[in-house]
């Protein structure tokens, strides 16, 4: 084999994107937990004006009542970090971080279910009883909307036979009910009560509860080279009902501002039936008319939130390739936007990479480093495709040491980034992809394996597919976290 023809092109190493913890972009950190510890949450001051305390309503069977109270106390108290010690700082307590206390809602707000699953609801199969109980609970909580901020719902393991049935998923059904009444919910299972790493548990739950109550923990700091006025859309598809018999595609369009904030989404039910259901199972897609409709609604959502100003640049992410009719639909709807990029984000690349260092052995130039490939490594393959290591070593975000590899000992797999429309340096698209992996507010990790444009839209599309009666409206994402 000719070495020169098989040699990979030179790689690019991007800096770890920074997060900002105030609107002036002067409180910056690469580690979200360390940033919260140093600066507090992005909108802590305005959140305190909105509600002087984060009030938690409890919905649980009698046996979980005391455990949920203890869980709230865990979030309220401080804890020394015992795991992931190069990333997770000690937890100082909810009020110290978010500048408001976390408290129980008034006594009349809470809902106590019987321990016996078959005593729930008004008869029927187990999942029907659970759905009835959740429906009644959300309707009752709606009457006390001004007396709580988040509902914590305990679904015990002993009720597991009611969690899934044909066309039913308990978690998705609860989120859809919460969306109907604009009630954010935190689902708790028995595993949480057995989790002994209290600092990690408190960090994770405190951030999630703060966001669900309307808080913003952090945003993305301005990214070098990204034009001002850039916005992002994440698209995800799911087939309605049995995939083998499905005729229509459910689509979720998630809209983000340039800083990764303003997370709202559009629920959309395709109007055109699927001509080739077998192909759609592998690559769900929209017709030109349906894509035009969902993009038009997404653009309207952005315009409404930004005083009628058009984005200068709009980047659209999805995990499957863009069909030609989809691209035509995109440009039909977005003809007034100066720059549009359509990018496929593939997370199943077969490529792997090993980071080499200079060898001290005689006659050997290099040898594998004990650290994996750095996060932010980009290998441009063609003018419109690149491998992007969103997973990898990120010591700059650590609390000390030269190694911070989230996920352990496996060899990190890159994202396969393919641009189907648009132009400009692929390094910019890669930097945005890496930065958006840090915007999952339902997680205490440094990053998610895929950008939030993909992760959130996938979750929402699945929920919409499982709950046919969910109206095709616009929703804040916090209701589905």
Image (cartoon, rainbow, N blue to C red):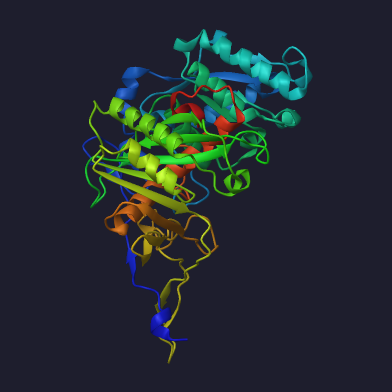
Examine the rendered structure and indicate whether residue 274 appears above or below residue 429: above
Where is residue 248 drawn, in percent x and y? Answer: 57, 34
Q: Residue at x 31, y 19 (%)?
A: 49
Q: Residue at x 57, y 15 (%)?
A: 138
The answer to whether residue 360 is seen in the rendering is no
Examine the rendered structure and indicate whether residue 17 appears above or below residue 248: below
Where is residue 429 drawn, in percent x and y? Answer: 33, 53
Where is residue 261 drawn, in percent x and y? Answer: 34, 35
The answer to whether residue 395 is seen in the rendering is yes
Q: Residue at x 45, y 73 (%)?
A: 369
Q: Residue furthest front?
A: 275
When asked about the image quadrant of residue 198, the answer is top right
**Side of 284 where 291 appears, left or right:** left
**Side of 333 where 463 appears, left or right:** right
Number of numbered discs present? 0
| Nearer to me, 129 or 45 | 129
| Nearer to me, 69 or 308 | 308
Examine the rendered structure and indicate whether residue 209 appears above or below residue 6: above
**Side of 120 where 17 appears, left or right:** left
Where is residue 107 drawn, in percent x and y? Answer: 55, 10
């Amino acid at each position: 084999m000719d070495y020169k023809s098989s040699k990979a092109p030179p790689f690019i190493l991007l800096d770890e994107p920074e997060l900002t913890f105030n609107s002036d972009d002067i409180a910056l950190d690469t580690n979200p937990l360390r940033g919260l510890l140093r600066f507090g949450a992005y909108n802590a001051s305005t959140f305190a004006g909105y509600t002087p305390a984060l009030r938690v309503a409890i919905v649980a069977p009698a046996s979980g009542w005391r455990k949920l109270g203890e869980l709230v106390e865990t979030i309220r108290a401080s804890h020394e970090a015992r795991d992931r010690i190069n990333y997770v700082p000690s937890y100082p307590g909810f009020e110290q971080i978010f500048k408001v206390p976390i408290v129980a809602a008034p006594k009349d707000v809470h809902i106590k279910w019987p321990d016996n699953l078959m005593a729930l609801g008004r008869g029927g199969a187990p999942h029907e009883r659970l759905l009835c109980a959740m429906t009644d609970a959300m309707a009752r909580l709606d009457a006390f909307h001004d007396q709580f901020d988040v509902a914590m719902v305990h679904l015990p393991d002993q009720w597991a036979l009611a969690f899934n049935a044909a066309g039913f998923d308990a978690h998705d059904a609860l989120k859809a009910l919460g969306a109907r009444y604009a009630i954010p919910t935190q689902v708790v299972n028995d595993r949480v009560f057995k989790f002994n790493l209290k600092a990690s548990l408190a960090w994770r739950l405190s951030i999630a509860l703060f966001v669900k109550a309307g808080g913003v923990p952090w945003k993305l700091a301005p990214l070098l080279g990204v034009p001002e006025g850039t916005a992002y859309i994440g698209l995800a598809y799911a087939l309605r009902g049995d995939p083998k018999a499905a005729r229509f595609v459910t689509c979720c369009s998630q809209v983000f501002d340039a800083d990764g904030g303003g997370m709202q989404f559009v629920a959309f039910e395709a109007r055109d039936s699927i001509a080739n259901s077998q192909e759609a199972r592998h690559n769900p897609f929209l017709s030109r008319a349906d894509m035009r409709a969902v993009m038009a609604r997404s653009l309207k959502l952005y315009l409404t939130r930004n005083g009628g100003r058009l984005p200068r640049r709009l980047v659209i992410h999805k995990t499957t390739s863009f069909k030609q009719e989809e691209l035509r639909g995109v440009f039909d709807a977005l003809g007034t936007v100066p720059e549009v990029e359509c990018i496929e984000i593939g997370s199943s690349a077969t490529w792997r990479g090993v980071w080499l260092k200079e060898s001290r052995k005689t006659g050997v130039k290099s040898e594998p480093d004990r650290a994996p490939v750095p996060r932010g490594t980009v290998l441009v393959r063609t003018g419109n495709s690149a491998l992007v290591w969103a997973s990898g070593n990120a010591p700059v975000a650590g609390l000390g040491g030269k190694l911070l590899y989230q996920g352990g000992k496996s060899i990190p797999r890159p994202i396969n980034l393919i641009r189907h429309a648009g132009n400009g340096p692929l390094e910019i698209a890669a930097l945005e992809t890496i930065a958006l992996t840090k915007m999952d507010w339902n997680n205490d990790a440094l990053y998610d394996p895929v950008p939030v444009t993909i992760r959130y839209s996938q979750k929402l599309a699945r929920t919409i597919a499982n709950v046919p009666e969910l109206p095709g409206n616009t929703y804040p994402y916090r209701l589905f976290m």
